Structure formats: C-alpha cells, structure tokens
Amino acid sequence: MATYYSPRPSPVNLNAPNDEYNLEVDTSKIVVEGPTFNNLPESCDKFRILVIGKAGVGKSTICSVVFGVPPEKTGVSHRTVGTKREKVWQPITFPGENENLVLHDSGGFEAGDLKCVDEINSFIRYCISCRSNRPIESAEKEFFLNADVGDIPVVVVFTQFDTLVDDHFCQLRRRQRNRTKAVDMDQLEKDAMNFAIADYDSNYRGQFEREFGRRLRVAIIRLSMPQPEDGEPMETSGVDSLVKETRGMLLADGLKLLWTAAQCHSADMKLKESINLGMDVFWKAVGTSSIPFIPFVGATALYSAFIKILKIINTIWGIPSCTPLLHDSKVRNLFLQGCFDASAGDILTSKFLVALNFFGPLTATQTSTVILKMIAGISLLYEKLFWYIKNHPERVVSPATIGRMVMEFRRSQGQRNMSARLTYRINITNCYDKAACLAELEEAVEAGRSVMGKEGMRRKTIVHK
C-alpha cells in the first residue's frame, strides 16, 4: 500500500514537504504568471486572421460579432493610408478588448500581393455577398486558383443571405397578390427561406464548388446579417456554424486553443475547453492510472493546483480586464471561495475538511472531489463574467465585480447543485477513472448552469465534440 501511494514528481507538487492543514498558507507570496498555452506554433502567441472581401459585404460586422470588438475598431474596409502591402499586413490589435486576436486588413489585397499570404499563419476568411448576381468574379478566381495558402485553412463566407431570403419573399408575395387569395404570411416566410436555400446551394455555394472543386481546407458558410431601420445590427444567424467550422479546420491543438480564447461568441465552446484543460491539470495533479492518487494532500499543494487551474481557465475566457487582477491574492481567493462556499481562510487551514463535509484524512476520493470542484466553480464563475461583459461591453471587470459575482454564485442553488453532484457522485469506484471523472464534472457544471439560466446569464450556442 505504501508503494501504491509512493511520492512521485508532479507539476503541482502534491508531495510538498511540511504541508499540513494546521499550517497557514500565505497566498500573497504566490506569483501568477501571464496566461500562456502549450504546443503553440513558433512565433504564434495570438490568433491571426486575414479577412478578404469587397467593401460593404459585412466584414466589420462579422468581426464584431465573432470577436466582441466594436465594428468601427476592426479597421476592416476603412483603411485608406499607405501602400497596398502596408494596408494588408499592418496588424490590427485590440488591447483591453481582445488580447488574443490580430486582424489583417484586406484593403488593397490583389493578385500581386498573393505571395505574402504565408505571413498569415492562422486563418483566412474570404467574404462574398449574396447580394451580387455574380458572386464569383475575377478577384475570387484569381485568389482561389492562384493563391498558394499551403496548410492555412480558408473559410468562404457568403454574407447577407438575408437579402436573398427577402428577394424570394417579395417575389412570392407578388405572386400571391396576383392570385387574389388570402396570404398566409407564416407559410410565405417558410417558402421564401426554402427557395433562398435552394438558390444559394445552386448559384452561390454550387457555383463556387463548380469553379474550384471541393477542397479539404476550404469550408463554406452562409450568414444572415439583417439591418433594421435605425442602422443598428440585429442578431446574425450562421455565426454558430462559422465559429465551429473555424475551430474544426485548425490542425494544431495550440491554434484550436487560441481560437477558443479569441472568439467571443460561444460560451459553450469556452466552457467545454475550460473543463478539458482543467481535467489535464487534475490528472497531472492526482497522477496516472497506475499511481492515481496521493492520500495526504495539504493546503499549499491544493492551492498550487488551484492557481494552475485558475490561470489556464482565465486564458480561455480571454477577459482582458480580469487578467491583471489575478496578481492580487485577495482576488484569487474570491474565486476559491466561490468553488466551495467557504472563506479562503477556512479553506486553507485546518477547517478545510469541515468546510467540505469531509472527515478524516483527505483520501483519493476527497482529493479528486476537491480539485474537480475547483474546475467546475472557476468555469462557472468565468461564464458569469463572460455574459456580464457581453451584456455591458462598456464596463471592465473590477475586484468589486468579481466579489459580487462570487457572492451571487455562493448563494445560488446552482453552486449547491454543482457541489452536491461532485460530493456524492465521486467515490472510490470512479475516482481512478479519468473518463468517469470528466463525465461527472460535465454533469456538475451543467447542474450549476441550469439554475444560472434563470438569471439570464446562460446562453447555449455551440456544443462541439
């Protein structure tokens, strides 16, 4: 038995010497490094994307919706100074709004500039409007026939699909009026959508595939971007598919993580990645299937695991105003309190087991449960912060904001559901099984979200495998 739980190296040092619950932990002395991802391509610390297309096809709107930045700040289609090459390759960044993204303006992008495509090492998005009767023109032919993009994935986005639906709706309505019959508006809208989809499949997507063939590294998406009379953009449709297809086309795991962090549309995608990355820390912390757990884990070791989980989840959600706050131990401890509905002092002292309803030594089952609660709690708190910023883009996250969110979460039924699920479902029969722990963690997070939805903080957008 002693050999089974023998000390072994661990990234979170779960065998820290003299680490006991009756020893106070000075959390202010623990340094939190800047957010990073592993396995990134060389010189690629941000997601770089080149957006190509004529003026007026909706490039700025797409970037605003997907990346959570004001359309007037994207710089797409608005740059008029400099040479063609300078316009294309001058990076557009968004400090304080989206630190994981670099956009490149397509202004002046012509055949002579195609040799520079290799400077974009993440992604290319080519936008074509459905308003045009000739969607595939000379510029599109020049790019897709002559551009050597190598392994860079390309998404062709047929924008303004809503205008195609409107055109078919007007045609159908005129026919109905000529027949002097009562107009069924609901049926008319359904028919218009069906005709528009058939038109798109034949004359837009279909023409593209006939011209250039089906390519493994090219995805085709259609988007609707209706504009009301006051000029403010309405809710777009098709962005879910765009975000999901983009991630699916990326080959490197590091780029997938960068994309998940850079996109600000899908909370589900971020939450899913938070759980997966948290599980990576969890499994490194508790061991492997052959030496799964260390039976006695003290407060310092648990706090080290907590810091690693907090750091990686913070990176995935990409809330710039939140990152600097994590250098403050008081702010970090707020997140810790939300995970367990207990004060940080209680968690990191001899009262820890009592606070968690554990009695006796912290065994394999309890070690697993504690770390899983950290992952679930931090992930759910970041989702609350995500929707807070999305609903109030003019605001920044402050310590007071985090404190308020933590207090709301600690008092919520969602926190109790999450905690109870892990307390009573993790046991000696499944705590050694990574897949079983992941499944229970996902169920616990979902239990916490179900109640948060009543507060208007939950919006399911994408569930991807």
Image (cartoon, rainbow, N blue to C red):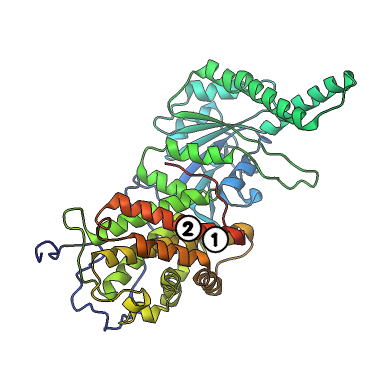
Instruction: Work out whether 34 lies above or below 62.
Output: below
Work out whether residue 158 can be spotted.
yes
Q: Which amino acid lies under the numbered mark 2 shown in the image of this protein?
A: Ala
Residue at position x 57%, y 37% from top? 106
**For mark 1, does the 10 Å Cα neighbourhood hold few (<14), some (14 to 19), or many (20 or more) residues?**
some
**Gap in Å between the C-alphas at discs 2 and 1?**
7 Å
Residue 447 - label? 2
Near-viewer residue (359 or 396): 359
* Residue 343: image location, x then y, percent: 42, 79
Residue 247 - label? none
Near-viewer residue (292 or 166): 292
**Could you tell me which secondary element the residue under label 1 belongs to?**
helix
145 horizontally vs 78: left or right: left
Instruction: Work out whether 40 lies above or below 204.
Output: below
Quadrant where the image shows the N terminus:
bottom left
Quadrant where the image shows the C terminus:
top left
* Residue 118: image location, x then y, percent: 42, 35
**For mark 2, does the 10 Å Cα neighbourhood hold few (<14), some (14 to 19), or many (20 or more) residues?**
many
115 horizontally vs 9: left or right: right
Residue at position x 49%, y 71% from top? 410
Work out whether residue 79 can be spotted.
no
Q: Which amino acid lies under the numbered mark 1 shown in the image of this protein?
A: Val
- Say whether marks 2 and 1 touch (CB < 8 Å): yes
The residue under label 1 is: 451
294 horizontally vs 224: left or right: left
Q: Residue furthest right?
A: 180
Location of residue 284 (image quadrant): bottom left
**Could you tell me which secondary element the residue under label 2 belongs to?**
helix
* Residue 341: image location, x then y, percent: 44, 73
Residue at position x 61%, y 47% from top? 64
226 horizontally vs 126: left or right: right
Near-viewer residue (262 or 438): 438
